[in-house]
Image (spheres, grey):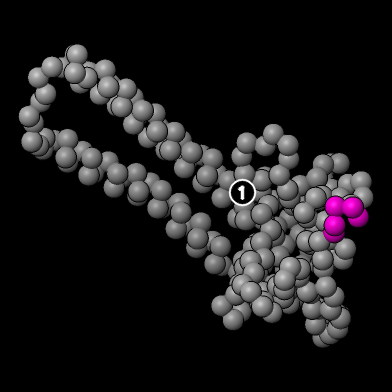
Amino acid sequence: MIDFSGFARVATSARAGLAAMAMLASSTAFAAEGGVFGHATPGQMKLIEGETPIAREIDFFHNDILLPIIIVISLFVLALLIYVMIRFNEKANPVPSKTTHHALLEVAWTIVPVLILVVIAVPSFRLLTHQLVLPKGDVTVKVTGKQWYWSYDYPKDQGGGFSFDSLMKDEKDLKPGDLRLLAVDNEAVVPVNKVVRVQVTAADVIHSFVIQSFG
């Protein structure tokens, strides 16, 4: 877990095929106006609130594009099923239809899904492109995934020259304000108003370094 209480942007780059990418922007992930961000809250119905431009684009894509399309399609299919059950049951329609094809209907159910996919694909590819555009890093932090904790290495030529392990706290060690399954004994800290490259690798099994509220 990273303590985000005082930094602006982080960009993640790939290495050895084990990479995670996140653009960390001007908002802080923790401690804003007395609130706590970066994790789910009780009763939450949507994605974790985005704290970066990329995360906010993901929220918009999910909430304003995907969800309306999914809801409309689901309601349309439900309405069709109800109509078919009522209109074409044995009592209402004792003589079943022998229709073999319907050209207009076949064209419609081919073109409409294609148009829906285009509507989804355009913003999706634009979002993917934005995620791949990474600024030059001011600081590099190497993150190594292990079973089951993270190790952080700060380069000496950038004011570091040290490394440490970050292990999740046991429930019995949690203090007031600590987040279950997120609180760690040693939190990683990065400088404010800097772009930080996070090089991710693994010592044993494949790990995924992710910060949900940063996209």
- The spot of residue 159 in percent (x, y) is 86, 80
Q: In which quadrant of the rendered view does residue 41 lie?
A: top right
Is 171 one of the magenta-colored residues? yes
Does residue 203 sit above or below 214 in this rendering? below
Residue at 76% from the left image edge and 68% from the top image edge? 149
- The spot of residue 26 in percent (x, y) is 73, 55
- The spot of residue 199 in percent (x, y) is 68, 76
Residue at 79% from the left image edge and 78% from the top image edge? 153
Query: Magenta part of the protein: which range?
Result: 169-173
Residue at 78% from the left image edge and 74% from the top image edge? 151
Does residue 197 sit above or below 24 in this rendering? below
Q: In which quadrant of the rendered view does residue 25 lie?
A: bottom right
Does residue 92 sit above or below 97 in this rendering? above
Residue at 54% from the left image edge and 61% from the top image edge? 130
Does residue 121 sit above or below 87 in this rendering? below
In the image: residue 66, left or right of residue 79: right
Q: Name the residue under label 1.
A: 56
